[in-house]
Amino acid sequence: MTTSPCPVPAQAARQPSVHGLSQITSSLYISNGVAANNKLMLSSNHITTVINVSVEVVNTFYEDIQYVQVPVADAPSSRLYDFFDPIADHIHSVEMKQGRTLLHCAAGVSRSAALCLAYLMKYHAMSLLDAHTWTKSCRPIIRPNNGFWEQLIHYEFKLFSKNTVHMINSPVGVIPDVYEKEVRLMMPM
């Protein structure tokens, strides 16, 4: 990995949370929809902006928090690519104002993770592979769907004119090569 995008507290990197808020950078968190509506969790982590990347989760609106809606379904055919730049720019602008952003979808696994990876590529100059490795170390349950992977691969090429992740054929169909080892371990000998 090049450089970590944080200063993330060492404790956050060692003890990733999948039920609460997972800290990705000093100003960016990912969670599921339940945690995103938990007033105590939002205030104790000093969240100033909540970005809801779903069509099914309804946010409870709390005072002093800005809400952004990204109405995308968790389907491989959904166009999340159109939101990569605007959402990355928004997360960056919140950080520049000393704010903190929470990205969430229903489970905090696919849509919010994909937007997080796009942000890390654009604003932390991380390759897609490094962004995925880093984010997975902070939130082990991330797993963007294959359509989002294809869009992220396209975005990485747009940003850096090269790719560090590729879609490959596997016994379970076409997958990003970051899952190749995992799939091989699942297959009977």
Image: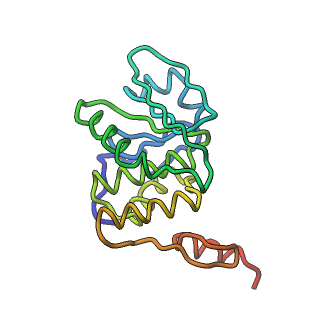
Q: Residue furthest left?
A: 96
Vertical placement of 141 versus 178: above or below?
above
- The percent position of residue 98, horizontal first and vertical second, equals 25, 31
- Work out which quarter of the rendered image holds the N terminus and state it: bottom left
Q: Is residue 133 visible?
A: yes
| Residue 45, above or below 118 | above
Viewer-nearest residue: 100 or 76: 76
Q: Who's the residue at 51% across and 34% down the image? A: 52
Quarter of the figure with the C terminus: bottom right
Q: Is residue 135 left or right of residue 110?
A: left
- For residue 161, side relative to residue 11 (left or right): left
Instruction: Report the residue that reaches farthest toward the bottom.
Output: 189
Q: Say which residue appears at 30% left-offset and 30% top-offset.
A: 99
The residue under the point 46% across, 26% down is: 42
Vertical placement of 30 versus 177: above or below?
above
Foreground of the two, 78 or 58: 78
Residue 160, horizontal then vertical, whole percent: 29, 66
| Image location of residue 15, percent across then percent down | 49, 48
- Between 62 and 71, the residue placed more toward the observer is 71
Percent x, y for residue 38? 55, 24
Say whether residue 59 is left or right of residue 185: left
Residue farthest along the top direction in this orientation: 63
Residue shown at the point (30%, 52%) measured from the top left: 5
Q: How many marks?
A: 0
Using the rendered image of the protein, determine whether residue 46 is visible from the camera's viewpoint: no
